Image (tube, helix red, strand yellow):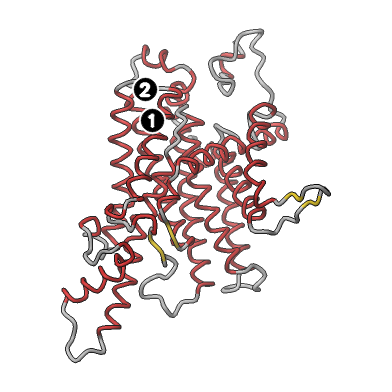
Amino acid sequence: MKKGFLAKNPSVLIFLLCLAAFTLAVTLLSEAYGVSFLSTSFVKTLGKTLCLCLVALAMDLIWGYCGILSLGHFAFFGLGGYMIGMWLMYARTEEIVVQALAGGPLPPTPEEIVTGIGTQIFGVVGGAEVPLVWFFAHSLTAQLVLVVLVPGLLALVFGWLAFRSRVTGVYLSILTQAMTLALALYLFQNDSGLRGNNGLSGLQNLPGLDEVSQDALSVWFLWASALALGLGYLLCAWVVSGKFGSVIRAIRDDEQRVRFLGYSVENYKLAVFTLTAIIAAIAGALYYPQAGIINPAELAPIASIYLAVWVAIGGRGRLYGAVIGAAFVSLLSSWFTGGRAPDINLGIYVVKWVDWWQVLLGIAFVLVTLLAPKGIGGLFDLYQGRRLPDRKGADLGPDDSSLQEKEAVQ
């Protein structure tokens, strides 16, 4: 009898059950639907952490499985936030403008409403007209489509140009970083149509839900983030478990050999690059309504570097490792930078973790790279008693993560 996907991949089912249990526990401990043990701000932090875990999954798929170190995936994350943020800000401002004009002697015309919206949103950058890029901002459906379409098209075009030129390795990483920097610099300009350095704000206020408290909204977004992470994990596990996953792992380990075997390496790379960009954009669309604001600084190249650090610390080439790394570093960062970690008085100097957290993160990355290349996820291998196969003195291959168990027993 043929086994189903979950039967052949029990780790996926275990992850989904753990995620469901976590979501239920947070709900029961929340202020909105539980015993008020967890504050609303902390529930939002947990919801944002789940979104970061989702973008880490995308990073692990493109880097850990396909071998492409992209330093630009946080740009797609930010674009997803901008797309949904445009609708949130436009619709919320429209409600405010309509209420303000309702007290006039005559009902406001559509032109007056649009002018009022433009003045409210773009007055901070010296404008009064709604730019063309906001053409679909009034429609939630259209902006949800753009959450997928805009980052997906950008990744498709960029990937096609890069992969057809056979740019690989560090040069490709530099190109992705340059793309991110160029996009961030463009968004910093006031004439970009997205309010320049001011970004989009007030995103935590959902239009039409004024009567719903923030504690309830935080739980709703937690549910949505957990659902997206669960579906994203299921999708990524399905991608890497079949023939497609075998091919992209082979590309990671020996690209030239795969090309000589007749596979279209560029098409496989492009498919993975575009898919992971869309996953990152969906994560961003869920993250920034919980954060409440987005600006071009969120797209800075350093953010994508942090993303690579999360995956490396969690364990590259393991989907659960990416989730563990993102959750671990994100929550630890919130603890250190939030002033919860006590300062250490050394007598001649006081160590303040708010200032030293990034240094600690960098040291952790170096130590993991040198001493534990499998990251935190490698601990599960030790627990399960997994060992490297006895290849009778043969080389492990281009990548230490390429175990090739079937060859090892021959």
Residue position marked by numbered label 1 in the rendering: 175
Q: On the rendered image, what quadrant is the C terminus found in?
A: top right
Nearest the eye: 253 or 234: 253
| SS class, disc 2 | loop
Classify mark 1: residues with Cα within 10 Å, few (<14), some (14-19) or many (20+): some
Q: Are marks 1 and 2 in contact (CB under 8 Å)?
A: yes
Residue 89, which numbered label? none
Residue position marked by numbered label 2 in the rendering: 167
Q: Earlier in the sequence, mark 1 or mark 2?
A: 2
**In the image, is residue 401 above or below residue 239?**
above
| SS class, disc 1 | helix
Residue 208: quarter of image? bottom left
Taking the spot 23% from the left edge, 63% from the top edge, the residue there is: 130
**In the image, is residue 400 above or below residue 274?**
above
Residue 388: x and y in percent read: 66, 21
**Rounded to the nearest whole Å, what is the CA distance between mark 1 and mark 2?**
9 Å
Amino acid residing under circle 2: Val
Amino acid residing under circle 1: Leu
